[in-house]
Amino acid sequence: MERLVAAVLAAGVLQVLLATADDHYLLSRIAFGSCANQSAPQPIWDAINKFDPQVFIWLGDNIYGDIRRPFIFLGKERTIGPWQNAPRFIPSSSSEMLSRYNSAKNVPGYLRLRAKAKVVGTWDDHDYGLNDAGKEFSAKSTNQRLLLDFLDEPQDSPRRKQAGVYTSYTFGPPGKQVKIILLDTRYHRDPLSSDGSVLGDSQWSWLGKELRGPPSAITIIGSSIQVISNLSGTTGPLFYMESWGRFPKERDRLFKLINDSKRDGVFFISGDVHFGEITRYDCAAGYPLYDITSSGLTQAVEKVLPSPLRFIVRFLAWFTPSTMRVKNQNCRYRSCTYGEPNFGAIQINWDASPVNLKIQVRDINGLPVTGVDISLSELQAWNRTIKAGQDQRHCTLEVKLPWIVRYRLAILVYSVLALLLLALVGLICAVTLACRVCLKKCKTD
Ligand SMILES: *[C@@H]1O[C@H](CO)[C@@H](O)[C@H](O)[C@H]1NC(C)=O
Ligand SMILES: *[C@@H]1O[C@H](CO)[C@@H](O)[C@H](O)[C@H]1NC(C)=O
Ligand SMILES: *[C@@H]1O[C@H](CO)[C@@H](O)[C@H](O)[C@H]1NC(C)=O
Ligand SMILES: *[C@@H]1O[C@H](CO)[C@@H](O)[C@H](O)[C@H]1NC(C)=O
């Protein structure tokens, strides 16, 4: 009995020691990613393993748990069109979810990563259980357990008892601490277009405490959906994406909370959209708020078209206006977006003075496709006031653009469609006319 107590005590002490060591471990390499199809090959882990992150952050769609039905225009169950009467996505059973998580957890490259890096994460809609779902989704608490099992969350973790998967971690010795805050943008989220809540009351009060709490040199806020970019502002009425921008009141509340907390060194990371980009907004706090989006590890927007036609996707990405996107010499393409598989890579140079952050979105070979070098002193309110001119660009909301610019994608698409329609009508007329002439000729003959 005594021996058992001693063993338990020793194990406890060891755990405390390990935990302390972990907390004091200087964190200088972090990778993150989102949108990984567990049934598809995932070669990107090789590049991530080569980057050798100390921490890897899942930003959601860690598996595709729901069932996607094909587009059906006609028939009894129609999944698309104004006459749609059946959902395009349906949830799968929890045993199916579990089996998909098992596939994801046993991807060889991911197994290698798990063996040497700390893996943390949150979810987005498809691993929450249903495309675009929010607080109304009934399987949310079961699926919360499945995600936490996937992430090897300890059985006694408070995260298993709360409503939602939000959490935070602090790494590094005093003065060089990195705080990682992971939000849950699903469990408490009101319906899209309601301008309701994204986080819900309990998560808001928790987030307030996290941000007003002890300072850290760097604070990374992980959100499954984009925080800064509001692509919907320039892609509507063609299509709309999920983002904090769709909940303007809630987004302002987030910005105000960060500004009021007087916390320096905050930036966002996000996923969801199936392409990578870096955006910044200079008029929310006393310093620019960056949002580094990496999406996805396997899912990528360019894959919707066969390779010879992918230039169209790149053209449209360049053509769609964006007021928040960071465009610099580090971009591979002129649009400064990247629509093939990618991951996020954060390097912190603690030896530089001031401390330097190199944040990149990298491709399947580990090569950067867009990136920023930020001095930590740039992310401090006390010595940075927003300068008109250069930074003004990153202050204009997408919806405030002149309409001819804001809607230029829609104008282009509708014009092309109109032209095609016109050409079709012309063709039909020409054929009819030709037939008539022909018939007349036949008769007179
Ligand atoms: C995932 O990959 C499998 C195998 O390639 C494919 O059949 C399936 O449609 C993909 N799922 C998604 C959501 O892309
Ligand atoms: C984002 O765009 C949507 C769609 O146009 C709009 O309703 C919303 O107000 C925009 N949000 C912000 C913060 O500009
Ligand atoms: C941020 O807070 C300061 C006060 O600390 C205030 O003067 C400033 O207007 C706030 N900025 C925004 C964008 O709300
Ligand atoms: C902020 O202050 C630091 C330290 O005084 C200085 O090195 C840095 O250039 C300042 N940054 C800006 C943008 O003024």
Image (cartoon, rainbow, N blue to C red):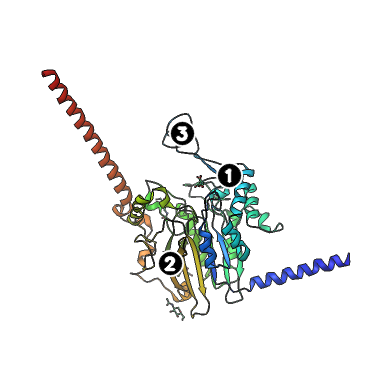
Q: Residue 218 appears in which quarter of the rendering?
A: bottom right
Residue 255 visible (yes or no): no
CA separation, marks 2 and 3? 43 Å
**Image quarter for ligand 4:** bottom left
Mark 1: few/some/many CA within 10 Å (<14, 14-19, 20+): some
Q: Earlier in the sequence, mark 1 or mark 2?
A: 1
Disc 2 beta carbon < 8 A from ligand 4? no
| Observer-nearest of 410 and 442 | 442
Q: Is residue 293 left or right of residue 437?
A: right
Vertical comparison of 367 with 321: above or below: below
Residue under circle 1? 137
Vertical comparison of 138 with 205: above or below: above
Relative image position of residue 309 (x, y in whole percent):
35, 50
Per the image, label 3 sits on a secondary structure element best described as loop
Q: Earlier in the sequence, mark 3 or mark 1?
A: 3
Q: Nearer the viewer, mark 1 or mark 2?
A: 2
Residue under circle 3? 78
| Count of marks, rendered view | 3
Badge 1 amino acid: Phe
Badge 3 amino acid: Arg
Quadrant (top left/top right/bottom left/bottom right) for the C terminus: top left
Per the image, label 1 sits on a secondary structure element best described as loop
Residue under circle 2? 371
Relative image position of residue 258 (x, y in whole percent):
51, 65
